[in-house]
Image (spheres, rainbow, N blue to C red):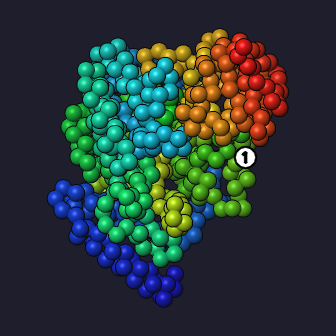
Amino acid sequence: MTEFQEQLRLQHEKTMHKELEMLLALSTGPEAEISRKDFDGFKSIFHRFLQRKGPSVEWAKIQRPPADLIQPYDAIKASCLPDGVTASLNKLVVVKLNGGLGTSMGCKGPKSLISVSNENTFLDLTVQQIEHLNKTYNTDVPLVLMNSFNTDEDTNKILQKYTHHRVKIHTFNQSRYPRINKESLLPIAKDLGMKGETADAWYPPGHGDIYASFHNSGLLDTLLAEGKEYIFVSNIDNLGATVDLSILQHLMSRPADRRCEFIMEVTDKTRADVKGGTLIQYEDHLRLLEIAQVPKAHVDEFKSVTKFKIFNTNNLWISLPAIKRLQQQNAMDLEIIVNPKTLDGGLNVIQLETAVGAAIKCFENALGVNVPRSRFLPVKTTSDLLLVMSNLYSLDAGSLTMSKKREFPSTPHVKLGSSFTKVQDFLTRFENIPDMLELDHLTVSGDVTFGKNVSLKGTVIIIANHGDRIDIPAGALLENKIVSGNLRILDH
């Protein structure tokens, strides 16, 4: 960086600080204290953003992780559970990342409140799972939800329905950062308001913010004082992310001087997962490599299923005392993800974000555990929703398990067209969910509806061209079929 560039950077940072102080001056009381902590965090990430000097990784230095640092789940599962399961569970906290809205599936409010199985929401299933653990092992595993300013109010309203469940539920909010004008690199916010025109001026800065927000909320200290030692963190929309007693015992049974502070669950990559972050060895540390960090010339190599065989499920087991230590030492050095957005009015902005898994390089004795695909069951689209609502899965104490009647463990590949994108539209197109036990692949495009008790087997492709409509009749069996054109069953 030349002297002129350094002066320019310093001047820019000074202007940003001035703008933030002006915004802070508009807030009073407890809100001012929260805003101050958020703005301090934002200043830190903005400072690092301005100082960036090229890519965060040198491609030539990337190595495959040593075999002993990515442990096979079967080896961990093979060691029998000792009698101390209750004691181990009493040191655990389950944390769900609950900052997302259901907008990509056409829903308003927190995504965690969408019904996904037998009219249970993501949140219902999570509470049922933990309550089952607490009753079975006579333990006190609490649930912690990391909300965002988008989800906090609606989530807290719904939590009242769980007051008589055997689960203590805590919440804390992740930070709120100002969006930055892409051209001027200054905040677009004119005040701290969250409604109307100013709502678009703010964003939650990615799940990597969990460490600072958890610490700043005071909840981290509360849980440490209660004797809690580990958190199990996962996305609330990953229905495979249940508490695994084998992984927990693996953590707890290691000698104190070799106690693992961070486990990332990874699973084998398929062609559907080519964009997922992967674990690498970099300068003698395990490190998460995201596609955003990969130089353009190496993107195809990154997507290769042969070179990078695993990807991050975002199911993480993390030591609470270690989080406290790293926060106090200001030693959480997470790579910045620059997320460009275009607002409704056409304004181009950037969001500076971080990922929770990127912290793996900061912790002692970190490991990857290669888990079965069943522990990664995210519901991001209505195509995913169709799978989890079908007879492929059965529900037991909040946990979904693949039906024993399915002859192979992989899930079918389902691709529903734009007519199915919104949950409400999706639900009106199925009188009930088809039998999918023997399905390999389903593609549906256009104006298509399904009658009751339809069975789908093998590869099924249904395409209604523009202006056409296809009604699959009640009781139909489609096996290795392509249906196209116009098909309507009329009531007589």
Question: In percent of the image, x 24 and y 38: which residue is there?
Answer: 224
Report the front residue among 492 and 198.
492
Question: Is label 1 in a helix, a strand or a loop?
Answer: loop
- The quadrant in which the C terminus is found is top right
**Picture quadrant where residue 145 is located:** top left
Percent of width and height locating residue 279: 58, 46
Seen from the viewer's position, the closer of residues 200 and 71 is 200
Residue under the point 65% across and 11% down = 405
Taking depth in this image into account, of 399 and 371 the one nearest to the observer is 399
x and y percentages locating residue 354 in the rendered image: 46, 55
Establish if 448 lies above or below 35. above
Q: Which residue is identified by label 1?
A: 304
Q: How many marks?
A: 1
The picture places residue 56, in percent across and down from the top left corner, at 55, 63
Q: Residue at x 54, y 62 (%)?
A: 342
Is any atom of residue 406 visible in this view?
A: no
Q: Is residue 277 above or below residue 256?
A: below
Residue at 54% of width from left, 33% of height from top? 424
Q: Is residue 51 above or below residue 438?
A: below
Residue 298 image offset from top left, x and y in percent: 70, 58
Quadrant of the rendered image containing residue 272: top right
Residue extending farthest front: 492
Mark 1 Cα within 10 Å, few/some/many (few <14, many 20+)? some
> Could you tell whether 322 is left or right of 350 in the image?
left
Tag 1: amino acid: Ser
Position of 298 with respect to 183 (left or right) is right
Judged from this view, the residue extending furthest toward the left is: 29
- Can you see residue 414? yes
